[in-house]
Image (spheres, rainbow, N blue to C red):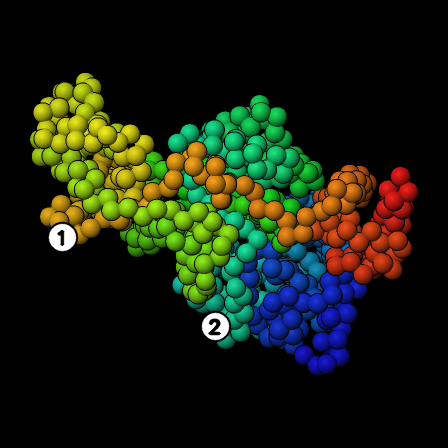
Amino acid sequence: MPDSDQARARRLLQDVWGYPSFRGLQEPVVEHVAGGGDALVLMPTGAGKSLCFQIPALLRPGLGVVVSPLIALMQDQVAALRELGLRAAFLNSSLDAATARQVQAQARAGELDLLYMAPERLLSESGMRLLEQCRLALFAIDEAHCVSQWGHDFRPEYGQLEILRERWPEVPRVALTATADIPTRKEIAQRLLLDDARSFVSSFDRPNIRYRVVEKRDGRAQLAQFIRDEHEGDCGVVYALSRSSVEEVAGLLAAQGMKALPYHAGLDSGMRARHLRRFLDEDGVVMVATIAFGMGIDKPDVRFVAHLDMPRSIEGYFQETGRAGRDGLPAQAWMAYGLADVVQQRRLIELGEADEAHKRLSTAKLDAMLALAEAADCRRVRLLAYFGEASEPCGNCDNCLQPPEMVDATEAAQKALSTVYRCRQASGTSFAATHVIDVLRGKSGDKVQRFGHDRLSTFGIGADWSEQDWRVLLRQLVAQHLLEVDSLHYNVLRLTEGSREVLRGERRVALRRQAPAAARKRRGAGGSAPQPAVALRDDDAILFEQLRAWRAEAARDHGVPAYVVFPDATLRAIAVARPRDLDELRSISGVGDKKRDTYGPALVRLIAGQAGA
């Protein structure tokens, strides 16, 4: 990119977006794409991927076409661009025929800088015809992991986007995603004919997010307590596996006074749209959802993402937790999981309609997720290593803040494995965890007596441990492949080759053991929400809340989500700096020319009034 273009790019960044400088790999990506090169860009959520195609689209002559998978995402991104004074529009099924024709006419006349399209619309006959009639600056393929059949958000239409290279070989293409392991990256490049594209792989680290996993005892009660104690009044997302669980959890939280809303594919489209708008427009809304919710959500002030059920892959976990803290301020990724989660996810894989190769890959991804959940060392190191990135212990995950105690559990493991073996030997069939634990603890119920397991030599040998302790042990044995769960046959436990090594004394078993909950609470490590890097003084905090109230009103007047007016990070900077005029306001990161002119006078008056109060 010539020096003049480089200067233009930096000037656009400052004048339009209000940022003093590019971050990370943004500038080299902008330079490469603006110069006509193809690119594959991997950056974590919140790292500013959108600028990597928005600025080149402004630098190059013609229309920038953005392929985006979600209607709500397109609408909010276009609203944000228009607030910046840019000429942007979208084409999707939400538009009536007259509005769609108007947008198409603007595109043909060169009156748009950026046009967002769903892949289905772009690939249609009318979509192809429209693009043939426009001068094209570039194609941006957002959420590019959707092209991968091994990915967590597979969209078959994305696999047909290779036509862009075939029909417009001279137009640069940039594919962007926040989550893709090395095999998925290769598949994206292959399917989109980007084999010769330059790859830009940023660090996947999100240092402002604190990762935390708790043993699931009463998951819903644990979740409610977590939000009450650490995130009262904060915006958050809660993920649950089933629609019924989503409804019940949203109801439970709402009954406790939280602004909690359900979101899943079983709700009618009107209700989903209303709930999404409330989540985007209001402060402090908790969205309880299945994984159908969230891809590409741009809301920057999500302070926590909670999982009530273990995700089936690290890619999915990283994508979902990445929706927290997009503004760079501290946030939490909280997950409760137990043995039932492992069983449930394995069952979903086995009962799925995928071929055996896909099932093997899905099982491997689940095993990696399980290893992350059971890790006794730094979770961030494990997470980043999955994406091929080396790192040092972070000091901001539960295991770093409160290292779990590692204990030699070989004897307890032998007791458990022996009980699994003897129950099958005595009855000719295998049994689930609940039955095995009853035998270990010496609980002589009807089923135990019916099979004669109260007469086994292992009956009662584990009476000194609680049911929960044994469940934790069995879960970790499954994680270490010292036991396996047959999810197709009543979730029974079976021995593996590794379990036989333990029984013969050829292999020791070390397990993680967390301190009791009371001790964790006394020490406080990992048990409180991370605090902002710079805490607001009392009077600044008062002004910050006044600014948020002003923002909510301004957003309603403009018909845009509150964060599109200004994100929390910008409001915090304004509350601290207390600009006295428009020039001082313009010097704050995130305040560009258009927003200064639109909102500046009201902001300066509000600040002056607060100072004189």
Q: Which residue is mark 1?
A: 506
Q: Residue at x 83, y 56 (%)?
A: 585
Q: Nearer the viewer, residue 12 or 414?
A: 414
- Taking the image as shown, residue 143 lies to the left or right of residue 96, namely left
Q: Residue at x 66, y 41 (%)?
A: 280
Quadrant in which residue 473 is drawn? top left
Residue 212, horizontal then vertical, whole percent = 47, 45
Q: Residue at x 58, y 40 (%)?
A: 236
Is residue 93 visible in this depiction of the protein?
A: no
Badge 2: residue crowd in 10 Å (few <14, some 14–19, many ≥20): some
Badge 1: residue crowd in 10 Å (few <14, some 14–19, many ≥20): few
Q: Residue at x 42, y 40 (%)?
A: 214
- Taking the image as shown, residue 173 lies to the left or right of residue 450, namely right
Is residue 218 visible in this depiction of the protein?
A: yes
Check the picture and name the quadrant holding the C terminus.
top right
Which three-letter amino acid code belongs to the residue tagged 2?
Asp
- Taking the image as shown, residue 221 lies to the left or right of residue 112, namely left
Residue 602, horizontal then vertical, whole percent = 88, 46
Which three-letter amino acid code belongs to the residue tagged 1?
Glu
Residue extending farthest top = 446
Residue 228, horizontal then vertical, whole percent = 57, 32
Check the picture and name the quadrant holding the N terminus.
bottom right
First in sequence, mark 1 or 2: give its number.
Answer: 2
Q: Nearer the viewer, residue 413 or 277?
A: 413
- Taking the image as shown, residue 246 lies to the left or right of residue 285, namely left
Residue extending farthest bottom = 2
Whether residues under marks 1 and 2 lie with C-beta atoms below 8 angstroms apart, the answer is: no
Q: Nearer the viewer, residue 66 or 509?
A: 509
Considering the numbered disc 1 on the image, is that residue within a helix, a strand or a loop?
Answer: loop
Measured Cα–Cα span from mark 1 to mark 2: 48 Å
Up the image or down, 289 lies above or below 580; here it is above
Q: Which residue is mark 2?
A: 195
